[in-house]
């Protein structure tokens, strides 16, 4: 491609809200045959709403008080919606000490010298906390409704469950259909549980998933997908997506995502509009055929 054609192409794409940071993308787009997506904030809105709060031996307000006080120290979309819920219920939060973020699992902190855990089932297992049959069956039924479930444990005992649900973006299904029409295989990677991941993937028609993945796993899965000369586009929005965005042949960051994701992507699509991912690929192809 001539440098001028690439420059013109990049300028044209920008008018459509597609920011191409790296001109090489235009040449690779033609060869893409796998598209991998993050779930939260990419396929879904990334604005989960709190639905169920189930207390065990403490009050509803206390469950929210403990979880939200810990979540106040996190920037995760889950944290934001739990804080919002605590505000709506006028619950006054407290300062925590020894705050820790356990990647892909949740949070740990101390309140009144007691260890508080707020996170998923892996976090409980990691801390050797037992789950009774009653709690396990409530957990399973929430998972079947494809909700994200956060456990609250105080001093080694489960004291509550909080569930959240996240809407699928209006454009997700159409985007996946378009990619399939272009002969591109689709894949979803998520730190969330398998049940929720499968429900979301089925709803939008994604071919295959990997659930319960840690940020470094996302990079390795992209590497695996690149085997056999496959050319992979990865689409994500979060801090945990940055390594995979860099590894992919084309990294596409959602324009409403985190700064680090936008820095790591080769392409940034404005407004987090997924259809722009398809547009970016089609657009690059068009520029290339005109140049060739
Ligand atoms: P993704 O963005 O791919 O869904 P993350 O790695 O950000 O995945 O999170 C994976 C899982 O870790 C979440 O679904 C949740 O169960 C747990 N988790 C992450 N951050 C928090 C948090 N602030 N509070 C509670 N749980 C969390
Ligand atoms: Mg995300």
Image: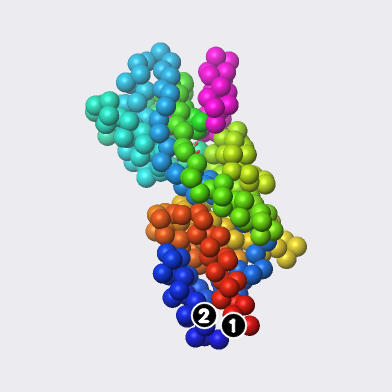
Residue 70 drawn in magenta: no
| Quadrant that contains the N terminus | bottom right
- In this rendered view, identify the residue nearer to me: 134 or 163: 163
State the extent of the magenta-drawn residues as a range: 117-146
Crowding at mark 2 (Cα within 10 Å: few <14, some 14-19, many 20+): many
| Quadrant that contains the C terminus | bottom right
Label number found at residue 183 = none
Which color scheme did the rendering employ for the protein?
A: rainbow
Q: Nearer the viewer, mark 2 or mark 1?
A: 1
Q: Position of residue 149 (x, y in %)?
A: 49, 30
- The answer to whether residue 226 of the structure is visible from this angle is no
Q: Main secondary structure of the magenta part?
A: helix
From the viewer's perspective, is residue 122 above or below residue 59?
Answer: below
Q: Position of residue 28 (x, y in %)?
A: 62, 71
- The answer to whether residue 166 of the structure is visible from this angle is yes
Furthest-right residue in this view: 228
Work out how far the residue at label 2 is from the one at label 1, CA to CA, in angstroms: 9 Å
Residue corresponding to mark 2 = 6
SS state under label 1:
helix
Q: Is residue 135 found left or right of 60 in the rendered image?
A: right
From the viewer's perspective, is residue 64 above or below residue 79?
Answer: above
Q: Position of residue 215 (x, y in %)?
A: 54, 50
Displayed quadrant of residue 146: top right
Residue corresponding to mark 1 = 291
| For the residues bearing labels 2 and 1, Cβ distance under 8 angstroms | yes
Measuring 37% from the left and 15% from the top, which residue is drawn there?
58
């Amino acid at each position: 491609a001539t440098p001028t054609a690439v420059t013109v192409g990049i300028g044209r794409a920008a008018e459509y809200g597609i920011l191409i940071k790296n001109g090489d993308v235009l040449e690779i787009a033609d060869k893409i045959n796998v598209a991998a997506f993050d779930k939260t904030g990419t396929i879904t809105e990334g604005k989960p709403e709190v639905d169920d709060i189930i207390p065990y031996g403490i009050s509803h307000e206390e469950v929210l008080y403990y979880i939200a006080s810990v979540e106040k120290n996190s920037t995760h979309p889950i944290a934001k919606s739990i804080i919002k819920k605590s505000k709506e219920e006028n619950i006054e939060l407290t300062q925590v000490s020894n705050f820790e973020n356990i990647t892909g699992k949740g949070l740990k902190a101390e309140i009144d010298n007691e260890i508080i855990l707020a996170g998923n089932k892996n976090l409980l297992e990691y801390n050797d906390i037992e789950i009774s049959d009653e709690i396990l069956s409530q957990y399973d039924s929430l998972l079947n409704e494809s909700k994200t479930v956060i456990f609250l444990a105080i001093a080694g005992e489960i004291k509550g469950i909080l569930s959240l649900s996240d809407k699928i973006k209006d454009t997700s299904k159409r985007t996946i259909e378009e990619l399939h029409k272009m002969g591109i295989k689709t894949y979803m990677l998520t730190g969330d549980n398998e049940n929720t991941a499968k429900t979301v993937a089925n709803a939008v028609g994604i071919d295959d998933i990997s659930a319960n993945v840690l940020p470094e796993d996302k990079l390795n899965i992209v590497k695996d997908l690149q085997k056999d000369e496959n050319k992979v586009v990865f689409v994500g929005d979060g801090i945990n997506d940055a390594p995979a965005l860099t590894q992919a042949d084309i990294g596409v960051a959602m324009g409403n995502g985190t700064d680090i994701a936008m820095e790591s992507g080769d392409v940034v699509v404005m407004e987090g509009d997924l259809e722009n991912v398809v547009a970016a690929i089609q657009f690059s192809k068009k520029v290339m055929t005109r140049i060739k």
